[in-house]
Image (cartoon, helix red, strand yellow):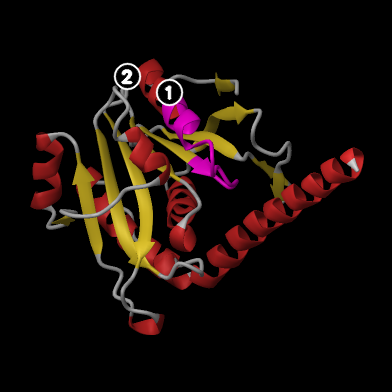
Amino acid sequence: MPVEIELWKKPKNPVIIEGFPGFGLIGTITTEFLISQLKAELIGRIRLDDIPAMVAIHDSKVIHPLGIYHAAKQNIAIIHVVTNVHGIEWQIARAITEIAEKLGAKEILSVEGVASPTQGEDADGATFYYANVQANQKRFEKVKVGRLREGVIVGVTGALLVERGAPVSAVFVETQTGLPDSKAAAEVIKVLDKYLGLKIDPAPLYEQAHKFEEKLKRIIDQTKITKDEQEKKKLSYVG
């Protein structure tokens, strides 16, 4: 399963933030918002044979399935994903680790949504962190984020935690599993803002929540429909 990493620019020693579609689309919403607010530019992409050969078009622009962006002022690399990576998490984690090595990344920061025990409007969007380096644990404690003490970490984040390379930290937020949740993503933005000193106002994400959610849900839904259509074509060829 070949993985190809294309980097048109190679910023030195960035922090890498990655977010994948999952519970509440937290990772994708957060990275989309960061790209917009930090005016990050596309500097590369990850290509895998195992993801559908398709791209989304939004505002007449191509949205890469696994795009790599860079915010020069803050020196943050952002991996923005709008495709399903179920079943290829290990390959993706190795690709991110390779990117971190190529760039000499200081840290890899993962963003994840976790199922909230409270349903509906009362979900509080509580945030937690996990970090495999003590210095970063202290930084999270300083900005008053609770530590994840028990749990099972799955997907790309789980795979990253056992890869060797740059320090890995993760920010988790409680969310509604079946719905895009911009409000919960805004809570993650608050944590990243304090942790990295970004000076980002999460208010636009609250205000534009519906717009963000509809845009990303439409892109991901269309990706799923196209993938299903491809699978049907394969079956028709066989049958």
Q: Is residue 239 left or right of residue 169?
A: right
Q: Measured from the top left, where is residue 216 in percent x and y? A: 59, 58
Q: Quadrant of the C terminus?
A: top right
- Label 1 belongs to which residue? 99
Q: Which residues are magenta?
A: 80-95
Is 119 above or below relative to 238?
below
The reply to whether residue 16 is in sight is no
In the rendered structure, does residue 92 fall within the stretch colored magenta? yes
Number of labelled discs? 2
Q: Are marks 2 and 1 in contact (CB under 8 Å)?
A: no
Measuring 40% from the left and 16% from the top, which residue is drawn there?
A: 102
Q: Give the x, y percent position of residue 198.
A: 29, 47
Residue 58 position in % (x across, y down): 69, 51
Q: Residue 66: percent from the left, percent from the top?
A: 56, 37
In the depicted view, which residue is nearer to us: 155 or 122? 155
Residue at the disc numbered 2: 104
Residue 219 is inside the magenta segment: no
Q: Specify whether residue 64 is in view.
A: yes
Q: Quick one: label 2 or label 1, which is nearer the N terminus? A: 1
SS assignment at label 1: helix
Q: Residue furthest top?
A: 102
Residue sitting nearer the eye, 91 or 5: 91
Alpha carbon distance from label 2 to label 1: 8 Å
